[in-house]
Image: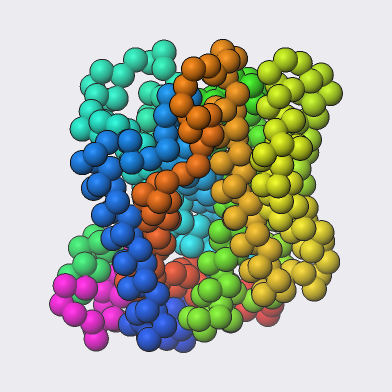
Amino acid sequence: MANHSTQPALSRFDEELKSISNDLLPRPFGRKGKIWTWLLLIITAIGIFFYIQQLKDGLIVTALRDYTPWGIYISNFVFFVAISLVGSLISAILKLTGASWRTPMTRISEIIAVAAIIFAAITITIDMGRPDRFLNLFFHGRMQSPIIWDVIVITTYLILSLLFLYIPMIPDLAYMRDNFKNVPKWQQKLYRKLAINWKNSPGQKDRMKQIILILSVMIIPVAFGIHTVTSWLFAATLRPGWDSTNFGPYFISGAFVVGAGGVIVAMYVFWKYLDMKKYFTDAHFDKMGKLLVLLSLVYFYFNINEYFIPAYKLKGIDSAHLQELFVGSYAWLFWSTQLIGMIIPIIVLLFKKGRKPFPMFIMSLFVIVGAWTKRFLIVVPTLNHPYIPIQRVPEEWLHYIPTIPEWFITIGTLTGALLIITLFVRLFPVVPIVETAEEHVSHEEEDK
């Protein structure tokens, strides 16, 4: 009796697997995909060119000086760290809460997290005047320094994120190893090596479930730790605008917002250009829109906490810092960031029509742009208001305007992260194949 009851389910699973694999297996890029890839390669190469110039001539090619030693490089670093938290949000937190609708987004969030954390480490190296001394952080670092805490937590999070990306993908790699034959030999060999003799046996599947559960539990505190420790790099420094006990939850809430926005943008691109409308449905966009609204409201709360109390007290140099943000030279950027990056998306996404794919795409782009400018506003204005007055220095030291090399290097890191995601999509299924087939069959059996 047991064999008769399981055989139809197995055959139905095979049919479902074959059906969805036609949609989800990676395919060669078309004309638009090739243009996109070449565009990313060219912009990244330009960034590398300017970085070589920076290595040759030193940080003098940038606008970084004694009073503004951190500029768009560190702003970009904090942005990358923020968006990397999406891996733990979608894959770990939603998994542990039993949100099965998250399945199509898991691999997207994981590759975004991996690409972001890789370029967070690269951006830190770019900011160093002597990158050849980078290994000294590991060999001669002091545990009293928050910078060492950041190095440790970033390294740990990168390792866990790579495992979280790779291990759930093994069944799909084995499926491609066995069925994806019309590809170059190097690609077949890649799938065979990465599949590590996966047979899809019950014992292997049980062990995988246990490993994924352990990783889900482990990665959440590390994910919270990476952005908390990054916030401590600022909060542990006695400077106006950074001397705040609110920075940890403030950074984490903002990171979840931009991470969710990044996943929605990727969902829309795959939905529109890779013909995945069956897997990224209006229901998925609707749920992600509600999640983004919730995260944005939490972030809005911490923004009020971050600015209201210092603005109410208006003491000393904090007053000058806030006045420059609210009504001074950074006011236009500050208010447009709050409006575009948070308030408008919240209002639009509260309505069901605003949670359709295209409005969600636009609002998520607003969130991402606002998140980057927000990091710039955290870093730069504070450095322009030290407790010790700036005296007897060149005029250009009083203001920070990024140079052309800085902009191209920074943009090159952003396109480099997008290039990793693009190449991943070319080689691997962006939506889990085996897991999706299992869920479809399971839902059919429940409906019966």
* In this rendering, position of residue 250 left or right of residue 418: right
* Residue at x 27%, y 36% (from the top left corner): 58
Residue 82 makes an appearance in the image: yes
Q: Is residue 273 above or below residue 307?
A: below
Instruction: Answer whether residue 171 is magenta in the image.
Output: yes
Q: Quadrant of the C terminus?
A: bottom right
* Residue at x 29%, y 47% (from the top left corner): 51
* Residue at x 56%, y 13% (from the top left corner): 388
Tag count in the figure?
0
Q: Is residue 38 above or below residue 70?
A: below
* In this rendering, position of residue 93 left or right of residue 178: right
Q: Position of residue 38 (x, y in %)?
A: 32, 73
Q: Position of residue 91 (x, y in %)?
A: 53, 53
Which SS does the magenta portion mostly show? helix
* Residue at x 46%, y 44% (from the top left corner): 402
Q: Position of residue 185 (x, y in %)?
A: 15, 77
Q: Is residue 158 above or below residue 36?
A: above
Q: Quadrant of residue 253?
A: top right
Q: Position of residue 364 (x, y in %)?
A: 64, 61
Q: Nearer the viewer, residue 39 or 408?
A: 408
Q: Nearer the viewer, residue 78 or 393?
A: 393
Q: Nearer the viewer, residue 349 or 57?
A: 57
Q: Nearer the viewer, residue 1 or 259?
A: 259
Residue 283 makes an appearance in the image: no
The colour scheme applied to this rendered structure is: rainbow
Residue range corresponding to the magenta coloring: 170-187
